[in-house]
Amino acid sequence: MKDGFGRRVTYLRLSVTELCNLRCRYCMPAEGICKKRHEDMMTEEETIRAVRAAASLGISKVRITGGEPLVKKNILSICEKTAAVPGIRQVCMTTNGTLLAGMAGPLKEAGVARLNLSLDTLDRDRYRSMTRVGSLDDALAGLEAALSAGFEQVKINAVLIGGFNDEEIPALAALTKDYPADVRFIELMPMGTEFGETAYLPCDTVLERLPELRPEEPDGGVARLYRLPGAKGRVGLISPVSSHFCGSCSRLRLTADGKVKPCLHSPAEYGIRGLDEEGMRQVMLQAIQAKPRQHDPLWEGQGSGAGRTMNQIGG
């Protein structure tokens, strides 16, 4: 399915919960969020119905997100049923990794092919400060479990934050020497973050700190790819602020409370809860046609127009 600007939409980011076991400072308030009523959220049946509707429009890749998807009690069932939908060729997941030690194997068996793990620091005190409640040891155990489980690909996502983890750029990138995983540095987006103007760093900062990086061929994703000499994995740079990739956007988002978002940084939402599969399909078709050419510029003085925090949309 193509949108109004000729972009083929093939990728659904599917949030299954707004809840998380961490309280990362760029994502959630310290006290967490007000838990919505069960009847206000998508049921498992509705979620899979939505995946079928999306597949009928040409969606072939689904990334399951949250909040933290692994706090969802029926997450394995959702993954297995999503992977079984005709037309869905790849199921991925983004997770903070802290619950992966006991879940990596079952997720792989349920049909999840690729994992993205959020890891912004390798310093235990900083990790605790950033997540407010988390343990770096749990995150690293999750990474080890993911690599041992035999997923097609494991990626580590690190949000660049000036004055917090910028001095760790070499150490984070060096994970690609020890592990067959990609480390992707992502620019901090102005979405309700408590960090100030000095926290934003363009991804080119990574190239300045690591001049030994060598370009790699693109793989069809949004990251510019590089490799350290002799590394097993790659370094990726994702620049939603300094150099947006709207021109090649193939995404549609579905929130855990049943709202289709054509664009992350737009307040536009289209509700699908309570609809049958054809009704969902028609709403998604409408949302695809409503995808904007690009979102408004992002900087500290001009925040995202998303209307929600990331945990409420799907990371």
Image (tube, rainbow, N blue to C red):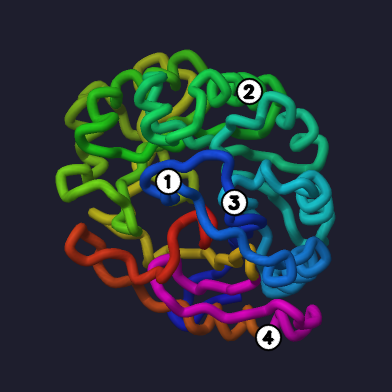
Q: Earlier in the sequence, mark 1 or mark 3?
A: 3
Q: Is residue 219 above or below residue 152?
A: below
Type of the residue with mark 1: Ala
Type of the residue with mark 4: Gln
Q: Earlier in the sequence, mark 1 or mark 4?
A: 1
Mark pair 1, 4: CA separation: 38 Å
The residue carrying mark 4 is 282
Mark pair 3, 2: CA separation: 25 Å
Q: Which residues are magenta?
A: 258-282
Mark pair 3, 4: CA separation: 29 Å
User: Percent x, y for residue 152?
Assistant: 66, 34
Mark carried by residue 147: 2
Type of the residue with mark 2: Leu
Type of the residue with mark 3: Leu
User: Percent x, y for residue 171?
Assistant: 34, 19
| Residue depicted at x 42% and y 27% | 128
User: Percent x, y for residue 259?
Assistant: 59, 73
Disc 3 element: loop
| Residue depicted at x 53% and y 35% | 117
In the rendered structure, are the residues bearing label 1 and label 2 in contact, judged by CB atoms less than 8 Å apart?
no
Disc 2 element: helix
Disc 1 element: loop
In the rendered structure, are the residues bearing label 1 and label 3 in contact, judged by CB atoms less than 8 Å apart?
no
Q: Is residue 142 above or below residue 111?
A: above
Nearer to me, 281 or 257: 257
The residue carrying mark 3 is 19
| Residue depicted at x 52% and y 39% | 22
| Residue depicted at x 40% and y 78% | 292
Q: Earlier in the sequence, mark 3 or mark 4?
A: 3
Disc 4 element: helix
Residue 41 sits in which quadrant? bottom right
